[in-house]
Amino acid sequence: MPRTRLCLWLLWSVACGAPSAPRARPATTSALTAAGTIAARPSPEKAPAGPTPWIEDDYARALETAKKERLPLLVDASAVWCHTCRAMRAFVLDDASLPGGFVRLSFDVEKDQNAAAAAAFPTHVLPTFFVVDPADGAIHGRWEGAGSVPQMRAFMRDAARSIELAHTNELAPDDPLALLLAGHRAALAGDARKSADAFSRALAKAPAAWEHAPEALLGLLKAQRHTGGPCAESAVAALTESPSRLGDTSVMADFASEALDCVEGSKDAAAVKLRQLVASEVARVARDASAPLSPDDRADAWKVVWDAREALGDRAGALEAARARLDVIEKAVAARPEPEWTTTFDGARMETLEFLGRGEDAASFLSAQEKALPGDYDPPHRLAHVYFKLKRYPEALAAVERALAKGYGARKGLMYRLEADILAAMGRKADARAALEKQLALYRSLPASQKKPGYEKAVQEQIDDLK
């Protein structure tokens, strides 16, 4: 299950997930320099202050604008159901202190009209941000999940610097920034070993207080987990370093979540030690009012603590963390009760109330959200999930049918699966199989950027089980 700021691409998650098939389009160093020197762009220091308006769901126009104005292209790959995406737009991406001098594109990865953008900017988690040289399409920056305003400022500034230096051949291959970028490009290409090597070298070359250290540490841990490297040992080392290079932002919680994945299913002493460390260190940051965390960040940090406590068999500790998470969410909702704002927290709020045995309370607020946001498919989809868990099957079926009428893209496949589960629970086996067949047909029709290997096979197996 997803634990943190990263809205992971998962198969059946209602709270945060949908299928996709990342397609790597790596940009090489030679590709960066092939275009040669172009006319000077405003440097980050001289660029107009403050962010420019977003271009929504129009990759071609954004790219053409960036080429015409000779400015880097900042890309926000997101989806309407992704709470982290909503939180980043609400708390970070429109902050006036972020650098100007960028053309900004935001696109919904599940809309058919954005297939070209989704193929150009492959994502494993949502949101993912890219900084692109419009002259040749080379990626000079990649950031997965949430980040603080200072982190996004550094990310944008240094990606713009990378573009400038690439055009003048001044970025040395062993510069920490070049190695960081090499790590991201290798990850996009699916080469975890090369990615791990690049991130490791970047950390070794960089100064101790390097502001990109949390990003590089997270990238290294992900790569090590995929290669079977010593990710648990690396996690312990990073979490116990004093002062920690991970800092106290949302990236630290994402790192801790990835660390839990390193020892998933293991019951040995090292795994127990790592889970205890994660629980204590992330709780420390979550409690720290001075930590640069949005309410959504802080709530997700408590989810990491909850997960660690559950993995340790500490039910009381997990419940305590869940209550702390709910307190953060409810205070944020009370401070700004507009439905367009509070929907950012709907998935986490639903999940936490269910865990605390308050499913009826989850149904109540989601019913209100559906009435307030009649064009949004998320409230009825989540409401159907809650009703299903409460065994209120007719109401669950009606809610998922309302969601299906508004749904699109890979997310709609999850709705069909939920519909099938509801129908099966009602004893309507043939109708459940028909819903799964609709899910399979939808997955087969998705553009390549939204497909994920094995999903169609999994649904077919479920259909066969109902015969």
Image (tube, grey):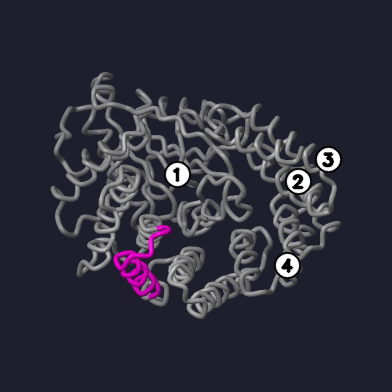
Residue 362 location (% of width, % of height): 70, 68
The three-letter code of the residue at mark 2 reads Ala
Look at 45% across and 33% down and name the residue there. 121
Q: Which mark is residue 221?
A: none
The three-letter code of the residue at mark 1 reads Thr
Counting other residues with Cα less than 10 Å from the Cα at mark 2, is it few (<14), some (14-19), or many (20 or more)?
many
User: Disc 3 versus disc 2: distance between alpha carbons?
Assistant: 10 Å
Q: Which residue is mark 3?
A: 430
Q: Are marks 4 and 2 in contact (CB under 8 Å)?
A: no
Q: Which residue is mark 2?
A: 420
Res 336 quadrant in image: bottom right
Q: Which mark is residue 365?
A: 4
User: Disc 1 versus disc 2: distance between alpha carbons?
Assistant: 31 Å
Q: Nearer the viewer, mark 1 or mark 2?
A: 2
Q: Secondary structure at mark 3?
A: helix
User: Disc 3 versus disc 1: distance between alpha carbons?
Assistant: 40 Å
Q: Nearer the viewer, mark 4 or mark 2?
A: 2
**Magenta region: which residues?**
264-283
Q: Is residue 380 magenta?
A: no
The three-letter code of the residue at mark 4 reads Phe
Q: Which mark is residue 128?
A: 1
Q: Secondary structure at mark 4?
A: helix
Q: Earlier in the sequence, mark 1 or mark 2?
A: 1
The three-letter code of the residue at mark 3 reads Ala
Q: Are marks 3 and 2 in contact (CB under 8 Å)?
A: no
Considering only vertical position in the picture, is 227 above or below 232? above
Look at 56% across and 37% down and name the residue there. 109
